[in-house]
Amino acid sequence: MHTSRDRFLDVVRAGAILAVIAQHWTMPVLSYSDGHLATGNALATPGWWVVTWLSQVMPLVFFAGGAANLISFRRAASPRQWLAGRIKRLMVPVLPLLAVWLIVPDFLRGLGVPPQPVQVGSAIAAQLLWFLAVYVLVVLLTPLMAAAHRRWGLKVPLAMGAAGILVDVARFNDFGYIGYANAIFVWVAVHQLGFHYVEGRLGSLSRRGALTLSAAGFGVTALMVAFGPYPASMIGMPGAPVSNMSPPTVLLAFLAVGQIGLLLAFRPQLNALAARPGVGDALGWLGARFMSVYLWHMPALIVVAGVTVYGLGYRTPAPGTVFWLVMAPGWFAACGLVLLGLLRLFAHFEMQRDTGALTVRTPQLVVAGLMVSGGLLGLAAHGFAPLSDGIAHGPVPWVLLATAGFLLAGRQIPVSDLLGRAVAVSERAALKR
């Protein structure tokens, strides 16, 4: 078991969030005319799907999260304390995002921005909350999965992978909604691989062994794309009938094996990179703000797109053209500067540490986590823009649900009382509107 900070995991986390940002800032193909914002995806360009096999790094985030969760779980005074700390730490950076985006849509409409661009921006800002919604569920399962790991070891992710295959079989045979079960089976399987890294079963692989593991993962992924019903792109594409991400397919578990093996093959070099002067400090800076960077990098993109595309009439060049390549650095620089500004305003929320006494019980924490997950998932699905047919159909109920879960994880309030307060707040807000 690792007893000190693992530089390899720091590099994986930092590389993953940077890859997420690069992918999301590269993807938009935007133009505005007559009140309508047209959107496209640069990675839908023919042949560019191959980029997503490396740029789709959510498997690496769950892998690194699994390793970090097992390490911290074993150090915690109790599972109850660990759960409370994890739920609150995940939710605290979200609170300012919720507060800002409850106001922004109405503010933009007051400035005369047409409803459709506001709706698009509000949906994009909330869309990435799906990860937190699923990750909270994985955190809730971690004490059980740690016990399963101790008893059955590698059989656990193999069983999860097998269940994921069965789910996909049902999904592709007219039982579409069952595919969402793989949000648990696939991501928990990858999360369990992080446990095996902590135990040394993966970390002790030789370079040849790691490259063999990587070849097996990418090879199975390629075979399933070539001969199965799976699309070649590892992210959802506009107009595509099937997405490997929403809901996730078992293909992402095999992709995870390929990516993890590839990184493990170069683990000594990555550790040496992390040990260089300045690099370790940069990794520490980014690690302390990981969730804030994740949450605010899309609002930064929205600000830049709003000013340039909506405000100045800029039309993004065709992907892959010389003009697109020339303009990309400036686009990235503008998004980066806005993101740094947003981090100065909001990152300190994530960096605070909860020092309060723990008074809640485990069942209450489980309910709190489910409320947080449900609220975030509702926001990811519906966006932040209020709908015209009343407050009950906008973001407010989901915000209340997630916030109530956060409060429930930190204070000993009966669930019935807390829900009653949430309903009362919602009713008062509806009357004001």
Image: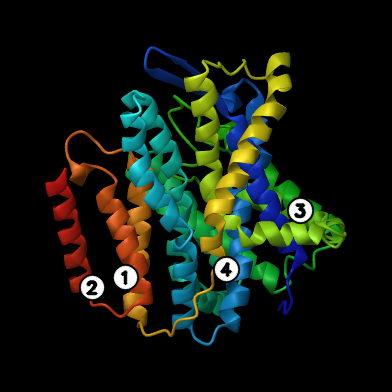
Given this view, does label 3 or label 1 mark the residue nearer the observer?
1
Q: Earlier in the sequence, mark 3 or mark 2?
A: 3
Q: Please give the residue where the numbered disc 1 appears in the rendered image.
A: 367
Question: Is disc 1 placed on a helix, strand or loop?
Answer: helix
Label number found at residue 415: 2
Q: Residue 178: percent from the left, percent from the top?
A: 35, 48
> In the image, is 427 to the left or to the right of 6?
left
Instruction: Please identify the residue farthest to the front as the structure is shown.
Output: 111
Q: Which mark is residue 101?
A: none
Q: Residue furthest top?
A: 34
In front of the other: 248 or 107:
107
- Give coordinates of residue 394: x percent, y percent: 25, 42
Task: Name which of mark 1 and mark 4 comes first in the sequence.
Answer: 4
The numbered dot on residue 155 is 4
Taking depth in this image into account, of 269 and 81 the one nearest to the observer is 81
Quarter that holds the N terminus: bottom right
Residue 268 in the image, given as x and y percentages of width and height: 86, 60
Q: Which mark is residue 263?
A: 3
Badges 1 and 2: C-beta atoms under 8 Å apart? yes
